[in-house]
Image (tube, rainbow, N blue to C red):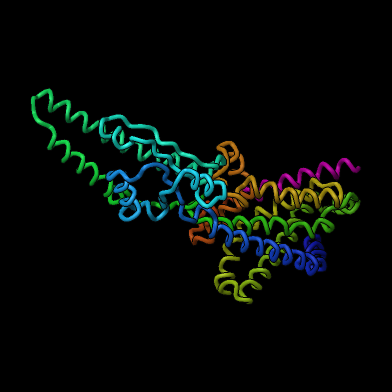
């Protein structure tokens, strides 16, 4: 107990400087978050997609179809078709004013009426897998399926009518109108389920929670000078007086955890006081985020244990926080990574902390979100005990 009290007094003397640095980190990441979220609102995937139509659209049916998409179809909320010449389309595409253009070949409608569906040429400059790739893969695939399957249905009906010596002209017109009506009414048979970018939350909430974890992960940098030292004489002296390496490590972690809790409390208090969010909500969120703080503090403390000098400690704390935050989905949604990265990143400490913070923000913090960070913290502290024990023995 005396060793724990001594460690707490040691941390208290160092706390003002560490708190100042932590507030600075919070301000910098807060400004970055505001800038990033503001940019995402005006991003390409939030804007209407402009698609050019090149070719002869004066044909009654084709012109009618284009006008129908503009006025009646649900896709007009995200897609705008504009008729233009090919030279104009190329110019607008090069300048980025349109996303892509579709070239309709001559005689397209006449070919369709005789069962010969010509290919449409889809021209875009996007090869990065952006919104135009989604458009090409999803919308054009849907159009192709509707065209092919409705065509198969009409031909099957006509073949059956011919086999039974029945006139099919009127039936063909009626079937075409039925298909046409079904296509126009397709939104009524679909339901929209917004699942968010990951973990069932929207992009802004996810990003804020992830940056929160990254910010807390950087709070360990000011404490490197306090917990990292190449001299193990004090540890050996305490061990000779009955304070084992395990007790020393646990006491040091407890004092560090108290400092981290106080730091987070002070920052949340500042946030609530200056009006960024409601003070009562800020304090409730602080209490809910303590389990996540446990695992982040344990990871930082383990970083102190494996460091041999101050320079290594700062590098491990800074780059470790950045790299792990990225892999664990705190900077970029983890659902967008390859499956292998998702699997590895999903079991790392900062991913556990991120999921706990998201649950806290959403108000559904359960037993798993509380127990998982604590269990992970115990594992990391045990690893720190093992490292300190080995270092203490090696110094003898």
State the residue at coordinates (61%, 43%): 345
The location of residue 270, given as percent across then percent down, is 66, 73
Reply above or below: 280 against 132.
Answer: below
- Residue 384 covered by magenta stretch: yes
Direction left: furthest residue: 165
Of 111 and 122, the residue lying toward us: 111
Q: Quadrant of the C terminus?
A: top right
Question: Image check: 196 left or right of 57?
Answer: right
Quadrant in the rendering for residue 358: bottom right
Reply above or below: 71 against 395.
Answer: below
The location of residue 171, given as percent across then percent down, is 13, 36
- Please report the bounds of the magenta region as a residue range: 376-396
Specify whether residue 244 is in view.
no
Of 193 and 364, the residue lying toward us: 193
Quadrant in the rendering for residue 266: bottom right
The location of residue 340, given as percent across then percent down, is 58, 36
Reply above or below: 146 against 355.
Answer: above
Question: Image check: 240 left or right of 201?
Answer: right
- Residue 176 covered by magenta stretch: no
The location of residue 169, given as percent across then percent down, is 13, 34
């Amino acid at each position: 107990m005396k060793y724990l009290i001594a460690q707490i007094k040691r941390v208290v003397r160092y706390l003002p400087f560490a708190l100042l640095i932590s507030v600075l980190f919070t301000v910098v990441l807060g400004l970055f978050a505001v800038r990033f979220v503001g940019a995402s609102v005006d991003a390409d995937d939030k804007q209407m997609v402009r698609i050019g139509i090149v070719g002869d659209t004066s044909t009654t049916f084709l012109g009618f179809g284009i006008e129908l998409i503009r006025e009646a179809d649900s896709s007009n909320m995200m897609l705008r078709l504009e008729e233009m010449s090919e030279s104009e389309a190329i110019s607008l595409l090069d300048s980025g004013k349109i996303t892509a253009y579709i070239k309709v070949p001559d005689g397209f409608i006449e070919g369709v009426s005789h069962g010969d569906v010509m290919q449409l040429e889809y021209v875009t400059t996007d090869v990065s897998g952006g919104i135009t790739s989604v458009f090409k893969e999803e919308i054009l695939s849907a159009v192709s399926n509707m065209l092919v399957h409705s065509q198969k249905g009409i031909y099957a009906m006509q073949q059956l009518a011919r086999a039974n010596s029945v006139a099919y002209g009127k039936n063909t017109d009626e079937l075409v109108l039925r298909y046409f009506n079904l296509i126009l009414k397709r939104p009524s048979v679909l339901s929209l389920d917004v699942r968010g970018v990951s973990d069932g939350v929207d992009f802004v909430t996810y990003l804020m929670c992830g940056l929160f974890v990254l910010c807390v992960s950087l709070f360990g940098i000011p404490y490197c000078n306090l917990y990292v030292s190449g001299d193990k004489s004090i540890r050996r002296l305490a061990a000779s007086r009955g304070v084992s390496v395990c007790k020393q490590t646990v006491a040091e972690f407890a004092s560090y955890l108290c400092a981290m809790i106080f730091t987070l409390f002070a920052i949340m208090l500042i946030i609530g006081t200056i009006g960024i969010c409601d003070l009562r909500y800020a304090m409730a969120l602080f209490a809910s985020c303590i389990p996540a703080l446990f695992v982040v503090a344990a990871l930082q403390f383990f970083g102190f244990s494996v460091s041999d000098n101050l320079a290594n400690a700062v590098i491990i704390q800074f780059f470790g926080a950045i790299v792990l935050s990225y892999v664990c989905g705190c900077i970029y949604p983890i659902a967008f990574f390859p499956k292998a990265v998702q699997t590895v990143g999903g079991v790392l400490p900062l991913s556990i902390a991120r999921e706990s913070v998201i649950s806290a923000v959403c108000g559904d913090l359960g037993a798993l979100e509380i127990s998982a960070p604590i269990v992970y913290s115990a594992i990391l502290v045990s690893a720190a005990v093992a490292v300190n024990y080995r270092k203490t023995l090696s110094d003898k």
